[in-house]
Image (spheres, grey):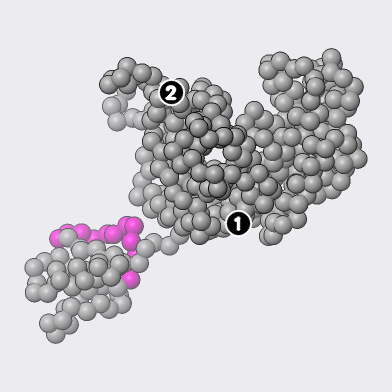
Amino acid sequence: MSAWLLPDHIADVLPSEARHIEELRRDLLDTARGYGYELVIPPLIEHLDSLLTGTGQALELQTFKLVDQLSGRSLGLRADTTPQVARIDAHLLGRQAVTRLCYCGPVLHTRPERPHATREPLQFGAEIYGHAGREADLEILTLALDCLKAARVDHLSVDMADVRIVRALLAGVMVDPQLLAEVHDALAAKDASELARVTRTFPDAARAGLRALVGLYGGAEVLDEAEKALPPMPAVRDALSSLKWLASRLEGVHTSFDLAEARGWGYYSGARFAVYARGAGDAVLRGGRYDGVGAVFGHKLDRERPAVGFSLDLKQLVRVADARPLRAAIRAPWGDAPGLHAAVRALRGRGETVVCVLPGQTEIDEFHCDRELVDAAGQWVVQAVA
């Protein structure tokens, strides 16, 4: 095997794609800052017991593990940044007020999440802590859509669900974790016969409600159908009302609902959403409400903080985002002519990109040199390239 071959699902990012990714990163962070989100940069590596505490347990199989040569303790390379940001909110910031945080950095996965996916996503995300109302859900969803628009991703559609519906239908039903996972798998697959099999010992009301969920997917009419088909439980009514309220306030995007959607059922606590774009085989962004995510990191304060947020992979996003033009640049000669170095420094000081053409150099791939620096009667001036 060649020494320079990389592991499966790990790849170098070459100049053109790297430039595009970096421009996307800056645009997304600027968009989040425009909403008042503060940037945090958690470490790539942490003690394993901290990294997998609480909701992080679901990430155990995706987490690379190693031993710290200094302390002998087990360490983990983060597979998701959200638990780290929850730790920062709960343990380091310790604020009582609403906190808005964003982040962007690499994560590592032991296995690709889907076919052809990288095991080293560049994860961007934004989260609100300290507000339990649906207003925070709307803000995070609006920010998510604005981030995708800033990335020049169009033809967006939002699919929504709410985990409180299934939890309400199963309230009071004794279900072990393995059987609960089978229920959610059957719901996700829309497999009515399998759902009937795994719920055969459930009370009739729970079985009827779960069976109804299998067919409750589609447009806004699904919510009206759900109000008739599902039991009139307060949690169910509140979830349906919240979904209807959120969808009514989204503009310029297609909305759909899948009330049997089971992704993240052990993690989310309320409304959840996925955003799709033209040309993407899977959702380009996922998010939702996950109240109490930071409770395990609390100390003196009550850290049962409500939380809602989203995340995306910039390496996936760049594949569906519109191509961007090359950065305009100024071509300059190489040499020691009087005033040349001072002219180049002055242009770069004003924010211009100046590429000095080295002897024998003929191509400048990643820049569009639409101007050049020339000597005009002893003065260095910039003029358009003919």
Residue type at numbered disc 2: Leu
The percent position of residue 137, horizontal first and vertical second, equals: 65, 48
* Range shown magenta: 359-370
User: Left of 266 or right of it: where is 363?
Assistant: left
251 to 186, vertically: above or below? below
Residue at 15%, 81% in the rendered image: 379
The percent position of residue 380, horizontal first and vertical second, equals: 18, 78
SS of the residue under disc 2: helix
Q: How many marks?
A: 2
* Extreme residue toward the front, this view: 300
Q: Which mark is residue 154?
A: 1
Question: In the rendered image, which residue does mark 2 sit on?
Answer: 48
The foreground one among 35 and 196 is 35
CA separation, marks 1 and 2? 39 Å
Q: Which mark is residue 114?
A: none
Residue type at numbered disc 1: Asp
In reply to whether residue 360 is colored magenta, the answer given is: yes
Q: Are marks 1 and 2 in contact (CB under 8 Å)?
A: no
